[in-house]
Image (tube, rainbow, N blue to C red):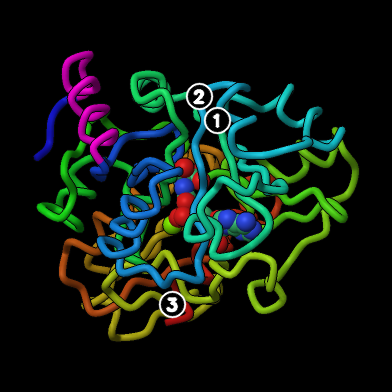
Amino acid sequence: MLLPATRDSIARAAVLLRQGGVVAFPTETVYGLGALAFDARAVARIFEIKGRPSFDPLIVHVADRSMLQEVVGVVPAAGETLIERFWPGPLTLVLAKRPAVPGLVTAGLSTVAVRMSDHPVARGLLEAVGSPLAAPSANPFGRLSPTRAEHVARMLGDRVDLILDGGATTHGIESTIVALEPRPVLLRPGAIAAEQIEALIGPLERVTPASAVRAPGQLAQHYAPATPLRLIDPGLVPDPERRRAGVITLRDPYEGYSASRILSRRGDLREAAAALFEMLHALDALGLDRIDAAPVRESGLGLAIMDRLRRAASR
Ligand code: TXA
Ligand code: MG
């Protein structure tokens, strides 16, 4: 069931969640698929619905500091600095977990990924539930993250107890994930540029998907549309198959494709990141043979865009 997010539907969603249900809801990044973090059976349903392997840990969403304390113990000084600056907002921190957090949520790790969304629906829902929610992105495992309620409905439909529709998300790309101990590591580039974080706490170690043993979910192949996607050399000469293909680029149009999407006419990487999944969903719906993606510069949000495109291409 898909309902516009209102005070009433949020209250209804909260009741479903407290009964062990699974509800999709908007955040400022992408739509999440939520269940009570402390209810292992409800969390198991998230894995079932997503077809997600149980070695891939989930993000726990909290509404405030007291919920954070239910989930994690001591927050290191760098964590406090980042929380002060970026919460509520699209930054996820990996911190030492409290024993009460079910092992299923963290895939048996001693750490838990936590974030505090600034989306009014996510916040309203967490406040109505009164307890932390485990919520990964609301897509089948490995597929594109949803930036609209309709994307969730199309991909997961009846398998979810309720979908709260809060319109399109603002950032359009997932949160940035940072682990702090034993040293600060960028586990996933995302909606907050790494440079902004480094300006506050110093250099972040960058992990490549292959070396990311600390993030079992950082699999090389991920965020993929159903249509095969490849990264192209921007200087490539046109090939005759273009008529069966779509193209997605930052600002420069490419000739000869049957469908094309420009991420940002101004070449603005924030605007491009916000449009990325939205445009990939749209191209994916056209039944093309292939999607070509032109690379973007890897600074600021370009890092997150290229991370998603590389994973989408590595099927
Ligand atoms: O923007 C977001 O973060 C969205 C919204 C819904 O909050 N959520 C999201 O969740 O992207 P998900 O499950 O699709 O991605 C979470 C990532 C996974 O790749 C997982 O491996 C990693 O976080 N992760 C979770 N717990 C971890 C931990 N304890 N250590 C390292 N990585 C962890
Ligand atoms: Mg995901």
* Residue identified by numbered label 1: 116
Against 31, residue 43 (above or below) is below
Taking depth in this image into account, of 199 and 217 the one nearest to the observer is 217
- In the rendered image, residue 219 lying in the magenta stretch gets the answer no
Q: Residue furthest front?
A: 100
Kindly indicate whether the residue at mark 1 contacts the one at mark 2 (C-beta within 8 angstroms): yes
Residue type (three-letter) at the residue carrying disc 1: Met
Whichever of callouts 2 and 3 sits on the residue coming sooner in the sequence is: 2
* Residue identified by numbered label 2: 63
Residue type (three-letter) at the residue carrying disc 2: Ala
Considering the whole magenta stretch, tell me its main secondary structure.
helix
Quadrant in the picture for residue 6: top left
* Image: magenta residue range: 5-19
Left or right: 300 as drawn, with respect to 172: right
Quote the CA–CA distance across marks 2 and 3.
39 Å
Q: Badge 2, how many Cα within 10 Å: few under 14, some, many 20+?
A: many
Q: Badge 3, how many Cα within 10 Å: few under 14, some, many 20+?
A: some
* Residue identified by numbered label 3: 230
Quadrant in the picture for residue 224: bottom left
Quote the CA–CA distance across marks 3 and 1.
34 Å
Whichever of callouts 3 and 1 sits on the residue coming sooner in the sequence is: 1
The answer to whether the beta carbon of the residue marked 1 is less than 8 Å from any atom of ligand 1 is: no
Taking depth in this image into account, of 157 and 133 the one nearest to the observer is 133
Is residue 305 visible to the viewer in this orientation of the structure? Answer: no
Identify the residue at image location x=30%, y=36%: 25
Which percent across, then down, holds residue 213? 68, 73
Against 255, residue 266 (above or below) is above
